[in-house]
Image (cartoon, helix red, strand yellow):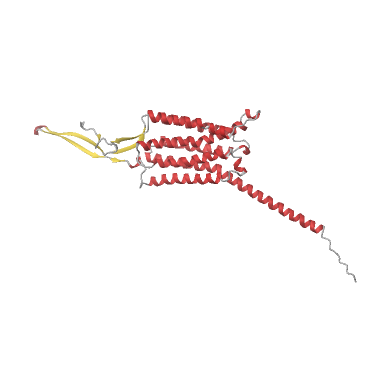
Amino acid sequence: GFPSGTWISSKESDDFGSRAFISVSFVFEIPNENLRWRILTVMPTEKVAMDSVTTGSTLFVVLIAAGLLGALMCTALFLAYYRRRFNYAVMVSDWRFTSAFIIGCVALNGSTFFLLGESTDVMCMLRVWSFHYLIIATLSPLLVKVWRIYQLVGSSASRFRRHTISHTKLALYMLPFHVVQLLILTVFSVIDPPKAKEWIEISSNSHHITCGRNSNAFRITELIFEGSLVLIGCILAYKSRNLDPRFGETKQILFSIYNICFIGVLTVLVSNLTDLEEAQTFVLQAIAIFWATVISSCAFVLSRLIEIKRSNAFRSNTSTTNLQQNEISGDLSFRINPPQQSVVSEKL
């Protein structure tokens, strides 16, 4: 069972994650002495620490910080935005779908925590479902929002007839995105589920345990589906870029979608063109989520908060000016028309 001169790998038992070894054998003989030995060299392998992010590593702290800080910052932005939903500057910005987008950003940052720990079949499945489904849950409000803006005031048809798209109808338009994503995840979870795969690299005497699939069909399908949605959003946002800001947050949507597109393309290129370990890929994903969600949420919330502050300052200055003008008018009236003094006649 041990071919001469060839390194082979073996396991201590059939249990997943049990100790592994690499071995090589060769024949030692002395013909004249009638001596023939088979010498077997066995060495234990080392599990690669960079295949997972576990407690005690620096990357563990980085992932916790990225996920927690991103979720807290997006939550703070959502609360600041939602509390001002009855302010005119927020009301005209279609705050319902903007709020849904920011809530999706909070949840997407939360998916970072599934990247922690050893790779098991359950964790591999949770990582795939949480990340890809929450991407659609986050993008869909943004996509239907920019689509409605374009349909109402941007398309050529809207110039000739009045068009109305209610909030309920627009919310229903998000369902196909969710249905298609759920269908993709379900089908591939059955025919080619993500599983923890164990393999031994003889050249480096290392024992790897990573998440993987039997083919790249799922990755290609998701890349086409999610990439197409982002591309459509970029096109609609670009066509709506010069619309009147009173009709919606055209500039903010353009910046947010382009920001998400840039981060997505950069992440895909880096992860596929460089030889990153599994743990390094997790960190790259966490940082990309943090940047895309926090910066895009800031584009919506901070611009409205600044607009509200300027509006309040303008009203305050206007009120002060009017009050001063009223005081000046009253003072001039007093000087021009002084009150009549009564003359008291005394009878002697």
| Residue reaching furthest to the bottom | 348
Return the x and y of residue 103 as percentages of the image width and height.
50, 41
Question: Looking at the figure, which quarter contains the N terminus?
Answer: top left
- In terms of depth relative to the viewer, which is nearer, 215 or 32? 215
Viewed as shown, does residue 334 lie left or right of 189?
Answer: right
Return the x and y of residue 96 as percentages of the image width and height.
56, 39
- The residue lying at 47 percent from left, 36 percent from top is 135
Residue 152 seen in this snapshot: yes
Question: Looking at the figure, which quarter contains the C terminus?
Answer: bottom right
Viewed as shown, does residue 294 lie left or right of 127?
Answer: right
Residue 273 seen in this snapshot: no
Residue 153 quadrant: top right
- The residue lying at 59 percent from left, 42 percent from top is 90
| Residue reaching furthest to the front | 347
Residue 194 quadrant: top left
Return the x and y of residue 298 as percentages of the image width and height.
53, 43
Viewed as shown, does residue 333 lie left or right of 177?
Answer: right
